[in-house]
Amino acid sequence: MVDVLSEYKSRFPWHAYATDDLRLGIRMYEAAEAIQKAIVQHNARHSLAWLVYDLDSETASTDWIDAGAPPPNIMAVNPDNGHAHLLYGLDAPVHDYNGASAKALRYMGAIDVALTAKLGADPGYSKLLSKNPLHDRWNTVFPRNRLYTLDELATGLDLDQYTDRRRRLPTVGLGRNCTLFEQLRRWAYRARRQPFLSEEMFSEAVRNQALIINTDFTPPLPRSEVRATAKSVARWTWRRMSSEGFTEYQRRQGRKSGQKRRWEASQLREAILKTMRECPALTQEDIAALHGVTRQTVSNHLRALGKTNVKRTISDRASLDRIQGAV
């Protein structure tokens, strides 16, 4: 169990967008000043510690119960109309900079899309700003005092339609972030193999591509998020994926692939040897069928083991039996 409000304070961004009135716009503040505002940026850049949902109904504080959704860690409720922001805290924040786990980001994005649907939350909510649970303008409730793992949040959600990584996530909530990140980094990897005069030119090309991808989203991501993602992808790709770096990357992958093939071959060879010891009457054809490989593969491994006297096929064994019977 944790003190959720203390956890919220400890995770608050060092610099954050904030405001007391959205009609007057937002601006960046240092943490000490931002945390005094009524509406604040809840996640640090590239670190997603809170999944936040916007419910615009008079019964928002209880809608999650009716929907059978997991209880939020924090609810910040507007006392004037009942609208609320529901915050789910992750025990291990997920990062969305290049080089972080794309698998974890995709998994979290799928959970976010599914939970948005289950809660009936606003699918167009940008997730940049939310009601500050530390501010006395809101009624704050803490239904759960233990943070979530991604697997815990996934319980009870239908994620089957989002498991195929070849398909884009719906452009809802963090689905847009995942799609932008995945499409942009793949584009940048290919583009980096082309000659660029400078890192600045490459960064501009990546930024322009990010803006193009963002035009497919309805609603689009905030330009600040798009620029931040583009900057991260461009910096990482320029330094790690140069033509020389790509050649070295291919060389490392080749070594890894070779090591894997050698390990798999040794495992199969040991399995074949074990089968021979336990069932000496089996032919090469029998052993191949048991292990799901060709007879030639079995023959090659036996030759490497110095076991060349194993009968090849059933007909060979029958012939041998007839010869032995005649004698």
Image (cartoon, rainbow, N blue to C red):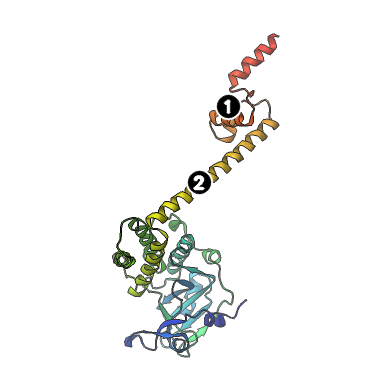
Place residue 18 in its image quadrant: bottom left
Whole-percent x and y of residue 43?
A: 46, 76
**Relative to 54, residue 280 above or below:** above
**Camera-nearest residue between 117 and 309:** 309
Whole-percent x and y of residue 235?
A: 39, 66
**What is the crowding at mark 1: few (fewer than 14 residues within 10 Å), some, or many (at least 20)?**
some
Residue assigned mark 2? 257
Which amino acid, mark 2?
Answer: Ser
**Camera-nearest residue between 185 and 81:** 185
Callout 2 secondary element: helix
Q: Are marks 2 and 1 in contact (CB under 8 Å)?
A: no
**Relative to 107, residue 39 above or below:** below
Whole-percent x and y of residue 198?
A: 32, 65
Numbered label attached to residue 285: 1
Place residue 278 in its image quadrant: top right
Which part of the image, by quadrant, shows the N terminus? Answer: bottom right
Q: CA distance from mark 2 to mark 1?
A: 28 Å
**Relative to 154, residue 252 above or below:** above
Relative placement, left or right, of 201 versus 89 is left
* Label 2 or label 1, whichever comes before in sequence order: 2
**Relative to 151, residue 260 above or below:** above
**Camera-nearest residue between 304 and 154:** 304
Which amino acid, mark 1?
Answer: Glu
Q: Residue at x 63, y 31 (%)?
A: 305
Which mark's residue is nearer the viewer, 2 or 1? 2
Whole-percent x and y of residue 111?
A: 47, 65
Which part of the image, by quadrant, shows the C terminus? Answer: top right
